[in-house]
Each structure stands twice: as structure tokens, then as C-alpha cells.
Amino acid sequence: MKSRVQVLVAGRVQGVSFRGQTERWAAGLALTGWVRNRLDGRVEVVAEGERDALEKLVELLRQGPPFARVESADVRWIDFQGEFDAFRVRRTDG
């Protein structure tokens, strides 16, 4: 079953390869969507794909890459929309 998830990750998550690692994780899980830094210091992830793959991504995001320190990950499940064709790093919001 396909789904969509939005995750806002807080902590030491910018400047530690978080977006690049997220892009690699998502590609390896056959997910589509995007990741970006936010001006408030968090990283935002929106991903679509199979629910079990999305749950694995959320688990990975809660751990973060080696130099990150994740303090929290706010997860919101949303209905699948099918709007993406790949997973990409986006520019910082602003």
C-alpha cells in the first residue's frame, strides 16, 4: 500500500550531510519526494512510496547520519498523491 509521509527532524541536522544521506536512503528504498533544510534549523522530508519502505526511512531519519544528533522527528502520515518521479535535495526554504 502506497502512502506519503512528512517528517520534520530537529537537532544537529544541518551541515552534517543529513540531506545527502537522506537522498541515498530514499533512493535505496525506491521512494520519491524531497528533503530540504529549513530556516528554523530543522530538516524537512516529504516522501512517497510503499508504507513499509517509508517506515524504514522514518527509522533511519530518527537515527540520522554519523555526525548528526537527532533530538526529535515529528512524523505526519498523509494520503499518497503520486506527484514525484524521483527523490531530490531541494534548496532551503525561505
Image: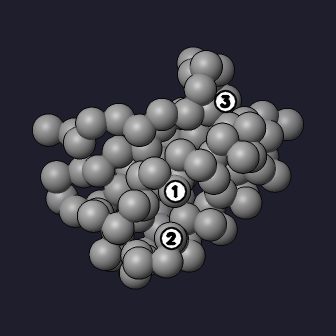
Q: Position of residue 22 (x, y in %)?
A: 53, 53
In the rendered structure, the answer to whether residue 24 lies left or right of residue 90 reads right
Q: Quadrant of the C terminus?
A: top left
Q: Quadrant of the N terminus?
A: top right
Q: Amino acid at mark 1?
A: Gln
Look at 33% across and 76% down and name the residue there: 11
Q: Are marks 1 and 2 in contact (CB under 8 Å)?
A: yes
In the rendered structure, the answer to whether residue 55 lies left or right of residue 83 reads right
Q: CA distance from mark 1 to mark 2?
A: 7 Å
SS category of the residue bearing label 2? loop
Q: Residue 70: which quarter of the image?
A: bottom left
SS category of the residue bearing label 1? helix
Look at 62% across and 66% down and name the residue there: 60
The type of colouring in the image is one colour
Q: CA distance from mark 3 to mark 1?
A: 23 Å
Is the residue 52 above or below the residue 56 in the image? above
Mark 2 vs mark 3, foreground winner is: 2
Q: Which residue is tagged 1?
A: 21
Residue 51 in view (yes/no): yes
Q: Which residue is tagged 3?
A: 80
Residue closer to the observer: 53 or 75? 53
Q: Position of residue 45 (x, y in %)?
A: 46, 48
In the rendered structure, the answer to whether residue 12 lies left or right of residue 78 reads left
SS category of the residue bearing label 3? loop
